[in-house]
Each structure stands twice: as C-alpha cells, then as structure tokens.
Image (spheres, grey):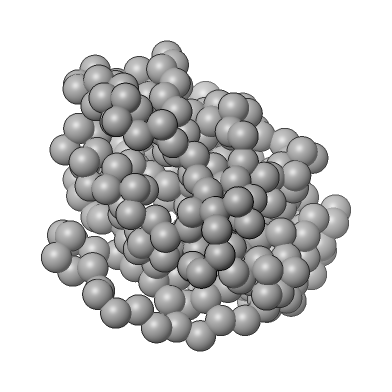
C-alpha cells in the first residue's frame, strides 16, 4: 500500500485460541505478514490446557499489536464475542487459530468496502489439507452481492461463519448473540444480512480452512449438539417475520438439522437425550405439510422428515 499507516483506520483481527499450539506459529506469522498497515490482533485464550496461552503471551511481548486475554473455557463463539467487546478497531475481522490467510487478506477486504460502500466484505474460503496447498498467486472477480443474490447463497451454506469477512464494527451494535453456541454464527449473520442488505465480495481465496480431525464438524451427539436446532429454528422464524420469501430456504436448514441430530441420536440407541430430541420431532410433525409442499426441500429429506416426525 502506497500511503502511510495513519491514513487507514484501525482494524482488529479477533482470534479465539484453544489448545492450538501446533498451529499458532503459523497463525502468528499470517497475522504479522498482513500488508494492511494499521492493525491490532486480539487473541482470546479460551481456557487452553496446552502451551497456547503461554505462546500468546510470548508473541505479545515481541509485537505490541498483539493483545491477549485469558478466559474460562466457553467455546469459540463466546470467545469471539469477548474479543469483539474488547477490540479497539473501527473495523473488525475474525480468524480461527488453526486456519491461515493470504498476506493481502485485510487489505483486499478493506478495499472492497471502500469500493462498494458496504459495511461488510468477504472473500472465498478455500479448503486445504496441508499448508503446501496454499496458492502463491491469487486472482478473482469482485462485485456487489445484493440481497436477492446474497440470501439464496447464504441458505446454501455460504457466508455462515464470522471469518473470511471484514465488518464495520458499528453493525454489531444491534445484533443479538444467542445463548446457544452451535450455529450461532448463522444466527448472527442472518441478522446482519437482513440489516445491511448487501455485501462486497471477491471470489479470490484469501482465507484457508485446514481440514483436520479436531474440527467442529466431527462433533458427536451430546446435549450441546442440540443447541444447533435452537439457532436454525430462530433464523427460520426471523425470515418468516422479516423476509418471508426466504422462509422455505430457512425451513430446509431446520429440517436438515433435525434429521441429522435425530439420526445421530438413534444410532446411539440411548434414551439419554430424549428430552432434547422431543422438540425436534414436534417441529417436524407440526410443519410436515409445509415441508411436503415446498420445493426448497429435496424429496429424500422430506421422507426422512416424515420418518422422524410422524412415525
């Protein structure tokens, strides 16, 4: 960037950290190599039991841009909210500590916001299996995703997560963070997209998600797993009230979550989570006519919804 750092507003990158000592050196390197000149890095150590907290403290002594907070373990979503409340930046971004980003990640996202006059910008997320798969040359088209193009992609599992985006911090002032912490990002992003109506976007892959066995996608059935239902149902109800043209798409995500959790619970062959499974069955049963009528739900999922909701 040709101008001085003082020209650019402070941007905070918030990173929840939990037992990630294996990945932290790479994470710190990605942050320190950012081309955008005016940054702070908010590391929230979420009760780590390995050397992660110590590593965060050590990097803070070497680079004053790193701000470290140690909290009791409560999950990544609560750690992000904690970091957001303490960030000083006019704009904020999020990064998971076991992921990595291109050196121009923040620079390009900030330029998108300036170019299109939005409060949110985003880039494509690329899945990798090892660091050597990160591309060295990145090109991509950019543009403005208006509401009618943004929301169908959102309900097809794009743009759910907090990372890979840059936000004007002010837009979080009216956002409600739910108590349930699974798919919490889906719930919050739905609010932000309804509020803002559009988002600047580049399909250049500036953010890299590394697949590994510790990912949340491997979460087993548990009491906490059922929290996902609370948040996807809340988004469905939100769309019914504020954007009914997308209610059927939101319903599809609720049905998929119900079927997934009920199937997982059935495989456990246990009555341990019966009280948590009952509301899911009730939802499927009470919405079965709407589920059968909508084209947004494919027929195999409809059959499974009938199985778990009626039989």
Q: Residue at x 49, y 54 (%)?
A: 37
Q: Residue at x 45, y 70 (%)?
A: 124
- Residue 229 visible in image: no
Which residue is situated farthest in the top direction here?
72
Residue 225 at x, y = what percent?
A: 43, 34
- Residue 83 visible in image: yes
Is 49 rendered above or below residue 12? above
Which residue is situated farthest in the right direction here?
241
Residue 101 at x, y = what percent?
A: 35, 58
Count the marks. Answer: 0
223 and 38: which one is in front?
A: 38
Is 269 rendered above or below residue 165? above
- Residue 127 relative to residue 310: left or right: left
226 and 45: which one is in front?
A: 45
Q: Residue at x 75, y 44 (%)?
A: 170
Q: Residue at x 24, y 64 (%)?
A: 128
- Residue 97 relative to residue 176: left or right: left
Residue 275 at x, y = what percent?
A: 52, 24
Residue 253 at x, y = what percent?
A: 57, 57
173 and 111: which one is in front?
A: 111
């Amino acid at each position: 960037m040709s101008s001085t750092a003082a020209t650019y507003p402070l941007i905070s990158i918030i990173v929840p950290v939990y037992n990630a000592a294996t990945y932290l050196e790479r994470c710190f390197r990605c942050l320190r190599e950012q081309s955008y000149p005016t940054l702070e890095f908010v590391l929230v150590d979420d009760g780590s039991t390995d050397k992660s907290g110590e590593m965060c403290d050590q990097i803070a002594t070497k680079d004053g841009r790193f701000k470290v907070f140690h909290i009791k373990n409560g999950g990544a979503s609560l750690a992000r909210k904690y970091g957001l409340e303490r960030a000083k930046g006019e704009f904020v971004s999020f990064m998971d500590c076991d992921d990595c980003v291109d050196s121009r990640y923040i620079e390009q996202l900030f330029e998108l916001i300036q170019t299109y006059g939005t409060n949110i910008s985003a880039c494509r997320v690329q899945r990798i299996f090892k660091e050597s798969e990160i591309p060295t040359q990145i090109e991509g088209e950019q543009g403005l995703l208006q509401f009618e193009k943004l929301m169908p992609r959102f309900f097809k599992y794009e743009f759910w997560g907090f990372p890979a985006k840059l936000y004007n911090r002010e837009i979080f002032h009216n956002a409600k963070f739910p108590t349930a912490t699974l798919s919490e990002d889906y719930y919050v992003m739905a609010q932000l997209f309804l509020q803002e109506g559009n988002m600047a976007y580049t399909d250049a892959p500036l953010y890299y998600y590394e697949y590994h066995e510790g990912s949340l996608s491997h979460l087993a059935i548990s009491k906490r797993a059922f929290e996902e239902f609370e948040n996807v149902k809340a988004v469905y109800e939100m769309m019914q009230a504020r954007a009914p043209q997308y209610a059927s798409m939101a319903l599809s995500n609720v049905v998929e979550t119900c079927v997934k959790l009920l199937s997982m619970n059935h495989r456990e062959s246990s009555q341990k989570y019966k009280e948590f499974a009952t509301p899911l069955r009730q939802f499927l049963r009470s919405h079965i006519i709407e589920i059968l009528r909508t084209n947004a739900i494919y027929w195999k999922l409809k059959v499974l919804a009938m199985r778990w909701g009626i039989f």
